[in-house]
Amino acid sequence: MDERLRALGLVEAQRMAEALFATTAARGLVVPGRSERAASDRIGDLARELFGTAARLPGPLVRSGPHTLLPYGPETSDRVIGEDDVVVAELGSVLAVSEAGFASTLVFGQDPDKHRLALDLPRMFTACREALLADSRITGRGLHAELQALAATSGWTVAGWHCGHLVGADPSASVRDVRPDAYICAENDRQLRRTLQGGWQAHWILEIHLVDGRRGFGGSYKRLLDLV
């Protein structure tokens, strides 16, 4: 596979994820009164309906309420989605050929702070992408600091030690067990735009996980950073 085909495959995976998120919302698959696992199962069934053998969801993961404070990876006990919950839907690799993951956030009820969070997530994603486009030499540390500043200005805390990773890197890894230059984190002083070993262009997933620890909720937004 050449670089162009690889990039096209990643963009197609994101298009499929966006379609899956939109159809999930339109069909009301994630609703108050339904358990997280039941909602996850319905998203998995929908993926197979829409994409057939191209769908490979090792686990669409739905988290709600206080479970949204947790990073991607650790399993939680099942929980029934509440009337005023924030809900995060995480998708694994939608395409069998893809190494990317995606996440979106839904809000139920009328809590203004929770709805503000749902709006701030894509807004901050756009701001971080613009920072990358404006400075081709920006490092992982630099973009991590950019997101930290945006979040603090809006009253949120960035959860976790990183806010993104190279396509194919493990998003749930511990900082002690990885090479920092594969992550958008304070320890990565290398440029994000670079050529990797083997001649591949570095492509990144920006993984924004904002939380309000005092009130016990958070939200996530995960998309391709450098490809549209």
Image (cartoon, grey):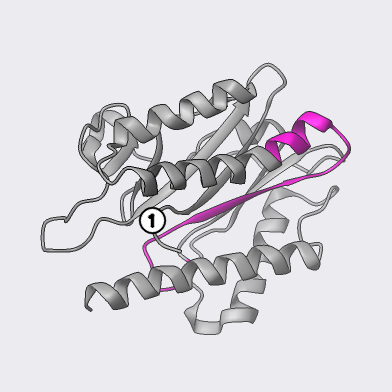
89 displayed left or right of 100: right
Query: Is residue 97 shown to the viewer in this render?
Result: no
x and y, in percent, of residue 184 in the image: 34, 38
Q: Going by the picture, which residue comes out furthest to the bottom?
A: 52
Q: Which residue is mark 1?
A: 226
Which residue extends farthest front?
A: 134
Magenta region, residue range? 94-118
User: Does 83 appear above or below 161?
Assistant: below
Q: Is residue 52 magenta?
A: no
Provide the secondary structure element on which disc 1 rests: loop
Which residue is at a point 31% across and 57% down the rendered structure image? 203
Which of these two is toward me, 217 or 122? Answer: 122
Q: Residue 96 placed where, x, y %?
A: 41, 73
Q: Amino acid at mark 1?
A: Asp
Residue at the top extreme? 214
Q: Which one is nearer the viewer's eye here, 68 or 153?
A: 153
The residue at the point 29 percent across, 39 percent down is 138
Q: Position of residue 193 (x, y in %)?
A: 25, 50
The magenta stretch spans residue 99:
yes
Q: Quadrant of residue 78 in the image? A: top right
Can I make out residue 220 in this image? yes
- 161 to the left or right of 30: left
- Count numbered badges in the picture: 1
Q: In which quarter of the view is residue 51 placed?
A: bottom right
Q: Position of residue 26 (x, y in %)?
A: 79, 67
- In the rendered image, the quadrant that contains the N terminus is bottom left
Q: From what the image shows, is residue 147 above or below residue 136? A: above
Judged left or right of residue 164, residue 40 is right
Q: Nearer the viewer, residue 67 or 84?
A: 84
